[in-house]
Amino acid sequence: MRAGTKRLPLRTLMNPPTMNDTQRPEVLISEAEIAERVQKLAEAIAPRIDNDTVVICLLTGGLWFAADLTRALYRAGRDVRFDALWLASYHDERKSTGRCEVRADLQRPLVGRRALVVDDVFDTGLSLSEAARLVKDAGASEVLTAVFARKPWPKDRGMEPDFVAWEAPARYLVGYGLDDEGKSRGLPYIGALD
């Protein structure tokens, strides 16, 4: 062992610290239910796309859903291309700033190709609308959108997604890419913190 390094007690390694019950989200949709919904969504999307389609993941939250969806699309007979677009409107806060900042742009050429923009949740619609506009401006022949969860919204949004896996309640959601000020994205289920 190097000088200055500290050994952890064996019981800490065997029983890592977990959230206490007051922090634990209420499970709304389990890991198994998520997998089932993603596969059904892929089967609905597959006839609308081809193998030249570029799936564009909205970072950071859409990463979990995009990974599962591209694998499910493969099982449904579509071997799609992949790219990502990093837009920020929340900045690790619980409320949107009302505008999108492009932190990392597309890397793959889209001219003449169909694109499927994928995100974790459709809330205000700001990120998905901006992403669809950017993808269209990049030359995509058609822009389709898919979200795992669509939350109800008190007023009309500028657009609606083409594909939705789950109609979510109007609650503060975490897990499966959804975060609480940067935390809880890695939960394998979707839960509510309110």
Image (spheres, grey):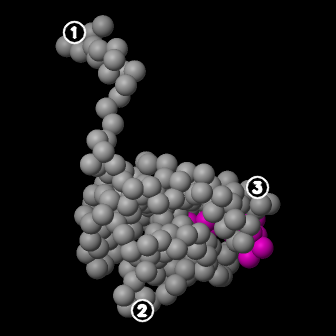
Residue behind mark 3: 75
Q: Position of residue 119 (x, y in %)?
A: 50, 67
Q: Residues within 10 Å of mark 2 (few under 14, many from 20)?
A: few
Marks 3 and 2, how far apart in space? 35 Å
Which residue type does callout 2 highlight?
Asp
- Asked whether residue 63 appears in the rendered view, the answer is no
Range drawn in magenta: 46-56
- Asked whether residue 66 appears in the rendered view, the answer is yes
Q: Position of residue 109 (x, y in %)?
A: 60, 68
Disc 2 element: loop
Q: Nearer the viewer, mark 1 or mark 2?
A: 2
- Front residue of 117/64: it is 64
Q: Is residue 23 above or below residue 163?
A: above
Residue behind mark 1: 3
Report the residue at 26% width, 71% height from top.
95
Q: Position of residue 159 (x, y in %)?
A: 49, 87
- Front residue of 172/97: it is 172
